[in-house]
Amino acid sequence: MALNRCLLLLRPGVSGSCCTTLRPSTFAVQRCLTCLYVNRLESVTTKRQYISPTPLPPLLAAAGSGSSGGNDDPFKVPDTSLFVPLQVKPAQGADVDIGAELTQVLNKSDVLKLLNKFYKRKEIQRLAAENGLDARLFHQAFVSFRKYVMESDSLSVDLHVILSDICCAAGHVDDLFPFFMRHAKQIFPMLDCMDDLRKISDLRLPPNWYPEARAIQRKIVFHAGPTNSGKTYHAIQRYLAAKSGVYCGPLKLLAHEIYQKSNDAGVPCDLVTGEELMFVDPEGRPANHAACTIEMCSVTTPYEVAVIDEIQMIKDPARGWAWTRALLGLCAEEIHICGEAAAINFVTELMFTTGEEVEVRNYKRLTPFTVLDYALESLDNLCPGDCIVCFNKNDIYSVSRQIEARGLECAVIYGSLPPGTKLAQAKKFNDPDDPCKILVATDAIGMGLNLSIKRIIFNSLVKPSTNEKGERETATITTSQALQISGRAGRFCSVFKEGEVTTMHRDDLMSLKKILSDPVEPIKTGGLHPTSEQIEMFAYHLPEATLSNLIDIFVSLSQVDGLYFVCNVDDFKFVADMIQHIPLNLRARYVFCTAPINKKQPFVCTALLKFARQFSRNEPMTFDWLCRHINWPLVPPKNIKDLVHLEAVHDVLDLYLWLSYRFMDMFPHANVVREIQKELDDIIQTGVCNITKLIRVSETSEGLRVMTEDEDLLAHMTNDRTVNLENLSTAMKALSPRRMRGTKVLGYRSVESDRHSNTKGPLATKLMEKGLLTKELLNQLQREWLKSQIKDESTAGKSDHNDPKEKRKKK
């Protein structure tokens, strides 16, 4: 009686209490405590309260529920497709089902019906939306909740009691909502910490990230002008005159050039790039001046003068964040910015947010360049000092092969070549005593190389690129790109004082003139990128999420004002997904994902994967280990494929050096690797100098492969030694030699178009020797093949109205 009285006192009189009836049980006390828990839960979340809640202001509602907000929510609505649900396994193998002891065994069929009824209720869907579950998340959470309830051998006591009450008509289906939300927050943990995640990903005040820079009043000087205007020269002069300074450039070549100039001028200067750290002091003490790639600049070291080169790259979809970081964060008394005038207004507005004024110094081009009224049209019209600009490697190979066929020697420069090879090719082209007077290059010549070019010739005006979303696209070059490349013609202090610009094809000339005459589009935004600290804080709240998923959620929730954009993170995510299965701590995983690799090179990606796997085992990457994986020592390339592989190996060595500065103990042999990288650079230089020979070998190998295929096909068709003339004729036409790569304007001529070519080649001789082909049959095949060629030309419209007899006469 005392126990019954206790239970009745605990019962608040709300329908659905499990104390409606009592039966003798060994779990009476546990049931009493369960009633207390359930009734307290009901007192907080009664049906009247959570079906018709008192409306809250949007901000309070969002803060209270951690929701993504509705239309009045000032926060950015997240992309919930990025929320990956965690797996909650159904409870299995319980020895005792306390819920069933307290109430009754649940009928799974009845439970399924009431769960489906719960899912369809509009009130529940509305409540879920107010608690951060949009339609997608609500559906995923319900499917997981239903699976958990239906497949569990035993449910938690409180949930079992509620389900039992609803099945017995002692409760309402809406009473499940608190338990449903509890489960939803288990599979979507971000629902419980959405406010914290929003604060972490709030990127609206980047100037506040750099307290050292905000603590001083900086002088900002913008040196604006086109290429070859002397803007960088004047900034560097101020840098050399300062007591301390840092140069921040976009390329290793530029950083190395300033490093050499500084030391040659008697100003001790260190070199800092991602792969290399060179101190002028023998004991390794830092000098007062440093030349670095922009990603490596220090935002905590104080300087008197800092130079930021090529500021227009602040809009770059992948690397723009580095210029934003340098501009806002460098702790220098004077910041000298060099770049296009299109960035003046943006930099001025950006500096307004830091309370700093911008002094603008405008420069004009020192030597003029003119756009010619005629296109080159043929490589026969090339002159000394010409540079043909292509936008892909295949065109580089094609053009250089055709130039060599004309008895001319050319230098070759493209982006994936090592810096040493680029400099060697530039030196060869610039040397007045060298017979090499023609340059074939990609837009890699746009910065970082001093070249003596008289005329720039655009082989094409279409260039593949990556947009802000990380999508690959092909588009006509912009005015800024065209000016950057064209400006390499007629440089100050070069042999050619005036430059010329034209195109290879006549049809492109008018387009080029229009592009160059258009104003450069002003820069409106600068890039930002999540830091490792921000990602670590995200991971603290979402410990089960993958790094790739963390980045996706961060970008989805990130808020930026109108001056910024979040750089695309496709390369980062590519590496994150690639090494996800390797057990690494978050900081190490983040570093590996920021490694600068070309994801189009399988050999480099495989090397990164091996590095990460070896790192996870805590086994150092020794020199011997590396040599085994790159098959060192290497030999000079025999064909283009070998050359491309050597370039990939050079990138792997770069990757090793890059990682060695982040994990010195795990990559201990950086000095030895740098030595063999120099040897590899020499091997690649040899290959590039003989690039036309490599192309010829590659074409010969391809031709031999095709010939083998042709022989197999003919042998199959003549296997029974009885040749059908019509079939063999068809086969001969099908086996006509492949066209060489290239265009007619480059001088390529199809072998099949040469009517005077000797059809009786090695294949014909071989067939005759085997008795599969007679001389008479070969002559007849020649006549039929020639006739088919004339017919094809007639169909193409070259001689539509000619008399066939006249054709035979001409033949």
Image (cartoon, rainbow, N blue to C red):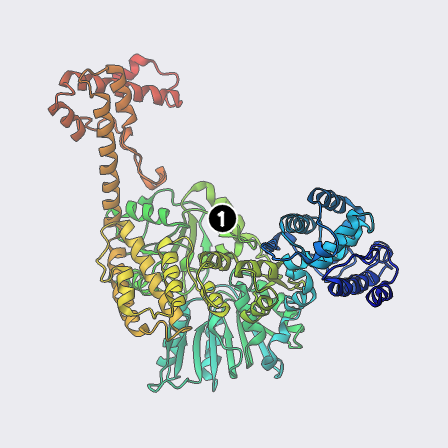
Q: Quadrant of the C terminus?
A: top left
Q: Is residue 415 visible?
A: no
| Drawn side of residue 757 relative to residue 130, left or right | left
Disc 1 marks which residue?
Answer: 512
| Drawn side of residue 615 relative to residue 788, left or right | right
| Drawn side of residue 190 relative to residue 594, left or right | right
Q: Is residue 98 visible?
A: yes
Q: Nearer the viewer, residue 685 or 235?
A: 685
Three-letter residue code for mark 1: Leu
- In the depicted structure, whether residue 90 falls above or below residue 626: above
Expressed as whole percent of the image width and height from the top left, the position of residue 331 reads: 55, 80
Element type where label 1 sits in the image: helix
Expressed as whole percent of the image width and height from the top left, the position of residue 287 reads: 41, 84
Expressed as whole percent of the image width and height from the top left, the position of residue 397 reads: 32, 48
- In the depicted structure, whether residue 397 falls above or below residue 315: above
Asked which quadrant contains residue 722, the reply is top left
| Drawn side of residue 235 relative to residue 1, left or right | left
